[in-house]
Image: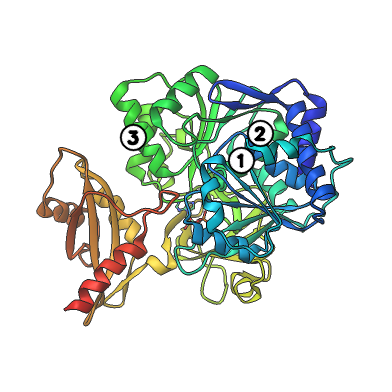
Amino acid sequence: MNVAQLLARTAQVYPDAPAIFRGTRLVCNYRELARRAACIAGYLRNTLKLVPGDRVALFMTNNTEYLEAMYGIWYAGLAAVPINAKLHAREAEFILQDAGASALFLSDDMADVLPALQAPDLRATFVAGGDSYDELLRAAPIAQIEPRTRNDLAWLFYTSGTTGRPKGVIESHGNLLAMTMCYFTDVDPASRDDAIVYAAPMSHGAGLYNFPHVLIGARHVVPDSGGFDPQELVGLAAQLRNASLFAAPTMVKRLVEHVAATGADTSGFKTIVYGGGPMYAEDIRHALAVMGDCFVQIYGQGESPMTITALSRAQLAERNHPRYDVRLASVGVAQSLVEVRVADADGKPLPPDTVGEVLVKGAPVMQGYWNNPEATAQALHDGWLLTGDLGSIDADGFLTLRDRSKDVIISGGSNIYPREVEEVLLLDPAVHEVSVVGRPHPEWGEDVIAFVALHPGKTTTVAELDTLCLDHIARFKRPKEYRFVELLPKNNYGKVLKTELRKILMQETNRK
Ligand code: AMP
């Protein structure tokens, strides 16, 4: 089944239901959203002569045309290639070339990058809101949605590429439909009264969550700012009510700090889904205290979109559970359409509470990497996806992530999981953010180094941080050095770039 059927069905059953908003202003209902998608599809197929399976890229900041364009692509049986709008033109160019994109949608604020882009397969470019886009909307609508099978490519999702070139993950129609069902069972029973707010890039997790909300006929809201502004978000939730959103842990932290400082009313928020990077136990504890039980955690990766595990609202609310502290620091339990296991280097399942690589198998798991059979063979073994994340599963089925395998520090032959040290350092109320990495050491292999950013106006000392570590973790895990910094380097999704921190340390070592 083609994911476009989700929109067609809602447009048929609830044609007048409000579909897309810019801020609090209604842009169109479901009838009109489906009409626009069908016209875009008509143009792409009949005028541009694209054929099913061709790739069409979107290099757009969040805007109200995003969903129209994506569903136009799917109505036509084509595949969408959403590119993170914060990427450099050269990076976008790599993706256009790698995907062999035949057409490109740009938001008007990106139009000036066009002359810089070289993509030989590109036959047409449309600037959202411009003349070329209006022409699409005037085209004759496609007669019917192009049928697609479960395994056909729907969304070519480029990994963030913190190590080497980004790879195109083949997310099929079947993968995305499975993810949609998991949203209802494991994350949130979305309803027609909900408003999903796109505060994070629509090219990534936030955009993937359009599917359950299109299926149920909810409202889709693009903030006026196009992104994440805590004050705007609080205002939007208050007016729209039943607001849901996907946010990276760093965004949740900023939102919670804003609410704690202003005492703003947050009753308009229904569900805040966080994930995509580690949420420290102290931070989620604080978030729950400030905003109440509106949080759900997911753990996923492009290769199993939004669907490996989830820590539900109910589990986060069960404060009297004897293992509550462990659960709070975990990423929850396997989502309903996947099997999750922790395995050794040979893929053999490990007993409870033993650290190994996290493996996942099931309907949402990718088909492979685009034009990259070697990487596919490395990542998929017998249907199991090797996530590259290390963790352990307890007897109750809760998965606790340690780190990405490449982030583990090996010092004097012992494994040190940076996350564990980071959790301890965050117990100091002066510490705002922290990242722990290894530095090459001639004798020990690696040394533990902590980069620490403090809350403005607050202070702490190396001695205090050291005492905290000695009180909580083994001596050999404690940092040999603390570096106080103003900010930690982050990628476009707000993830701390440990590669950058390691590079700094490596350069210093080489200079010596
Ligand atoms: P990406 O494919 O860019 O979305 O990155 C996926 C990676 O982000 C995963 O393999 C994990 O290392 C990390 N990640 C995702 N969700 C979580 C989470 N809830 N907690 C900790 N790390 C996470």
**Cα distance in 3D space between marks 1 and 2:** 7 Å
Residue 244: name its quadrant: top right
Is the Cβ of the residue at disc 1 closer than 8 Å to that at disc 2? yes
Beta carbon at label 3 within 8 Å of ligand 1: no
Asked whether the viewer can see residue 323, the reply is no
Q: Nearer the viewer, mark 2 or mark 3?
A: 2
Observer-side mark, 3 or 1, equals 1
Q: Earlier in the sequence, mark 2 or mark 3?
A: 2
The structure residue drawn at horizontal position 36% and vertical position 38%, both measured from the top left corner, is 253
Give residue 325's position: percent from left, percent from top. Answer: 38, 44
Query: Disc 1 marks which amino acid?
Result: Tyr
Please state if 474 lies on the left or on the right of 284 as rendered. left
> How many residues crowd around disc 1 within 10 Å: few (fewer than 14), some, or many (20 or more)?
many
Q: Earlier in the sequence, mark 3 or mark 1?
A: 1
Dot 3 falls on a residue whose secondary structure is helix
Examine the rendered structure and indicate whether residue 266 appears above or below residue 272: above
Q: How many marks?
A: 3
Q: Residue at x 51, y 41 (%)?
A: 109
Q: Amino acid at mark 3?
A: His
Mark 1 lies on residue: 209
Q: Under tag 2, what secondary structure?
A: helix
Question: What residue is disc 2 on?
Answer: 213
Q: Residue at x 36, y 54 (%)?
A: 496
Q: Which residue is mark 3?
A: 286
Viewer-proximal residue, 454 or 410? 454
Picture coordinates of residue 458, whole percent (x, y): 15, 39
Name the secondary structure under disc 1.
Answer: loop
- How far across and how far down the image is residue 340, in percent? 59, 58
In the image, residue 418 above or below residue 67: below
Give the image quarter of residue 167.
bottom right
Query: Dot 2, how many residues are within 10 Å of its Cα: few (below 14), some (14-19), or many (20+)?
Result: many
